[in-house]
Amino acid sequence: MTGDIETLETLSTDYKESMPADLRETKSFDWYLEECYEDPKITRNAHQRVADMFDYYGTTYDETEGVVEYLLASEDPLNDGENTFYGRVIHQSIHEFVNKVKSGARRLGPERRIKLLLGPVGSGKSHFDKQVRKYFEDYTLREEGRMYTFRWTNLCDVIQDQDPADDTVRSPMNQDPLVLLPLEQRQRVIDDLNENLDAPYTIQNEQALDPESEFYMDKLLAYYDDDLQQVLENHVEIVRFVADENKRQGLETFEPKDKKNQDETELTGDVNYSKIAIYGESDPRAFDYSGAFCNANRGIFSGEELLKLQREFLYDFLHATQEQTIKPKNNPRIDIDQVIVGRTNMPEYKDKKGDEKMEAFNDRTKRIDFPYVLSYEDEAEIYNKMLSNADVPDINVEPHTLEMAGLFGVLTRIEEPDTETIDLLSKAKAYNGEIDEGDDIDVKKLREEAEQKAEIGEGMVGVSPRFIGDEIAEAIMDSKHRQRGFLSPLTVFNFFEENLEHHGSIPEDNFEKYYRYLETVREEYKERAIEDVRHALAYDIDEIQRQGEKYMDHVMAYIDDDTIEDDLTGREQEPDETFLRSVEEKLDIPEDRKEDFRQEVSNWVSRRAREGEAFNPQDNERLRRALERKLWEDKKHNINFSALVSANEFDDDERSAWIDALMEQGYSEAGAKEVLEFAGAEVAKAEMDD
């Protein structure tokens, strides 16, 4: 074993440093009051704290889309990017969710609504919900996210029938200590705090004490002849409150144990039968604050598969949202403060949406759509993340494998375009950002048309990333069993085709259409594989640079209506129109669009020069493609195509060079041989036919 080893001492030190210094300390109410004036944000409500949490971990702004990306989702700083989210539509959904939380922080209405995450299976809504809860835990551990609650002490000194086991009782709802002040006095403090508060919201707290704390307050005030100071100094301790999902503190993930026999006490709490014999059934001390709404107080309530609950059970959410109270069967009402998040899939949403008896519930929800990713390169990042987070065998994922898997998924999710000028594949490429300046494609218009055409929204149906991820995993293990050290798109396609009809979430009516999409992806991959083979056969980076510089010299002379010096004779001559068109025609640029393209690349070169960047045709996607295709046309006559199609000449020096060139593109040696067999034969056949 080499390198440093961890010791118990260092592990203990690191843990201690990660915990708040005052986590185990108790403070006086007087201390808390002073601390509120010093830092009013410690008294924030749940919506305000969650809103600030999103900003705390950092943001970036996408001006093109008008969307704020929150780094806790786009970069996952706590876990070194392990749980990042990809795709424009996902970050748009997260942006919309945070906006609703921030509106709730300002008391604009969403604080009294359920934030309902709606999407198909595997769209990332549960993953995002979990991410929010994990970051909320971390935020409350930090100075910027700290919050406090209180506990009652020395109760047996005053209350004669108090169980000795209950001499010290923590606030059952983990309420903010400010609720210990009567409303009139509390409001005076809050008015002062708001004068010192640097935030886009104001502090508000009109909550009543929970019934058990109200009981203790009444008894103690009676004992001390309404001397509040005596009560708070002798019987209240302030303690740090940290959200912890495992301990069900400030965070609760709720799913009823039996959907056919639901009990509202799972949400609101129930009688504590062990205390009935001591206090009696109607005594507030005999209530068990273990309901999900109680546990989530001051934090986040997360309802899994919320709309699968019975209609009557969902009525409990009406008071929880609109009135911000809960009403247990055997206890007075309880004020709550929490961000209520629900998650549901499409079938349940459609069922409840069409139920007239659910009108009140539906009116108290704010829907946030979580569609599937619609950019296939972003989709590929999801699979790449899946592989990077797993113990993947020693296997090379060949170029285009994940992208083509993502393309298949995207084709099943986007709406067929109505216009004849663009097909489904071209639309998928447009959504992926593959639009040349000369292309007559309006992505915004495509999205608007799709939203009108889709039943709920584009991307809300289609093949789940889970299905594709599962098939990639199966293809990896199959490749290992067959001692293939690489995973190619061809293998993945085979698994898609074999298992499409075995996946329960794919409707039978879609099989034929999805098989057709798979063939489209096969053809797209074939074209890309052919490009890779051509690149390997003819690519010369120095020649690309020379040809690029020559092209730009002639373009600049053309635009400036100038002459250019001939390399051989040294004489001034007109720009070589034949050469210019030989490059442009490789991009199918027609004669009447050539000036637009030349001006485009000229502007690009000028921008680069202003930024101090040297000319490099590799940095311009369109120019690079044109030059590579021209280079192919210039060099293909010197290629031995018979060697390309001969399967028994792998030791041939020429073929070895081609394999080396493919390996430079990211292929494994065996994968390079496969793509030569798959696409090389197509290249050779096309050229030999010519």
Image: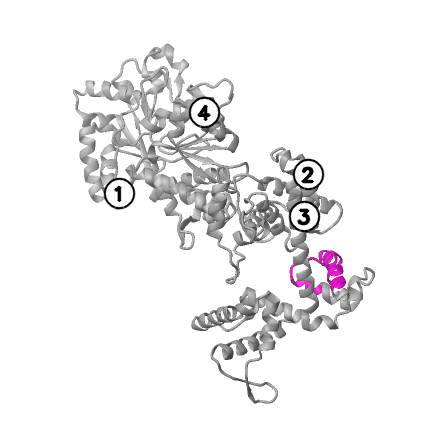
Magenta segment boundaries in residue numbering: 660-686
Label 4 neighbour load within 10 Å: few <14, some 14-19, many 20+: few
Residue at image mark 3: 519
The spot of residue 70 in percent (x, y) is 42, 48
Asked whether the beta carbons under mark 4 and mark 2 sit within 8 Å of each other, the answer is no
Secondary structure of the residue carrying numbered label 3: helix
The spot of residue 370 in percent (x, y) is 48, 40
Secondary structure of the residue carrying numbered label 4: loop
Q: Which mark is residue 297?
A: none
Taking the spot 55% from the left edge, 64% from the top edge, the residue there is 621
Q: Which mark is residue 355?
A: 4
> Alpha-carbon distance for marks 1 and 3?
62 Å
> Alpha-carbon distance for marks 4 and 3?
41 Å
Q: Nearer the viewer, mark 2 or mark 3?
A: 3
Residue at image mark 2: 499
> Alpha-carbon distance for marks 1 and 2?
58 Å
The spot of residue 177 in percent (x, y) is 27, 31
Label 1 neighbour load within 10 Å: few <14, some 14-19, many 20+: some
Label 3 neighbour load within 10 Å: few <14, some 14-19, many 20+: some
